[in-house]
Image: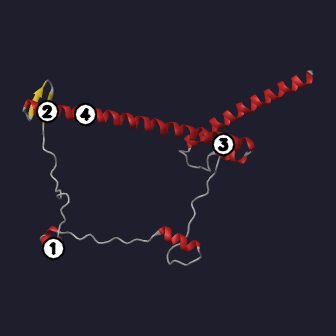
Amino acid sequence: MTTTSTTSGEQREDLRRSVEKLYELTDAIEEIYESTSGEVDWRSESLQRWIDDASSNTVEALCQFAAQMDAEADAAKKEVARIEAFRGRVENKAKWAERLLLDVLRKLGVRKIEVGTWHVGIRKGAASVKQLEGVEVDLGLLDPALVRTIPAKQEPDRKAIRAALERGEEVPAFYVAFGEEYVVIR
């Protein structure tokens, strides 16, 4: 019975040391990344030593580091979305206040006013040409100088070309290329 508790204590101590080592390796990975600006710099002594000493601990530490960085990136994405939503709400409030201000200026019957440190004025919107709704335009009735021709754009249909290549057909000047290999961590 004493042996079991000693073994269990030894196992816990081994596990604790392994976890500490993984955190040390994770910190080392981040230092290497920061010192090489994310580039794999094969001349870097610490990186080369790390690669030369590759072991299951190295793989586990890299997986942990990648998972941690993915989690931080996800958190950053959520924070960006939260800030963008906040910005949208604030912009909508500003537009609402400007619409109210326009109504107040119209009710006062003024186009310009100075209030405190503010100079407020009403300006006309930008001019644009609109077509009457439901009215068909006969281009032949318009002066040719008022009509523009937009040529149809033709370009290779890459999805159709890929399908043809995958069926074994030859398509001049095209081939199927694969992206760089990447690691999947689950």
> Could you tell me which secondary element the residue under label 2 belongs to?
strand
Give the answer, above or below, for where 165 lies relative to 8.
Answer: below
Give the image quarter of residue 170. bottom right
Depth-wise, is mark 2 or mark 3 nearer the camera?
2
Q: Closer to the camera, 160 or 25? A: 160
- Residue drawn 15% across and 33% down? 103
Q: Closer to the camera, 175 or 136? A: 136
Residue beneath label 1, please?
140
Residue beneath label 4, please?
96
Residue beneath label 2, please?
120
Left or right relative to 123: residue 69: right
Counting labels gives 4
- Residue drawn 72% across and 46% down? 54
Q: Which mark is residue 63?
A: 3
Among the two numbered marks 3 and 4 on one chain, the one whose residue lies closer to the N terminus: 3
Among the two numbered marks 3 and 1 on one chain, the one whose residue lies closer to the N terminus: 3
Cβ atoms under marks 3 and 4 closer than 8 Å: no
Cβ atoms under marks 4 and 2 closer than 8 Å: no
* Neighbour tally class for label 2: few under 14, some 14-19, many 20 plus, Cα within 10 Å: some
Residue type highlighted by circle 4: Trp
Spatial CA span between label 2 and label 3:
59 Å
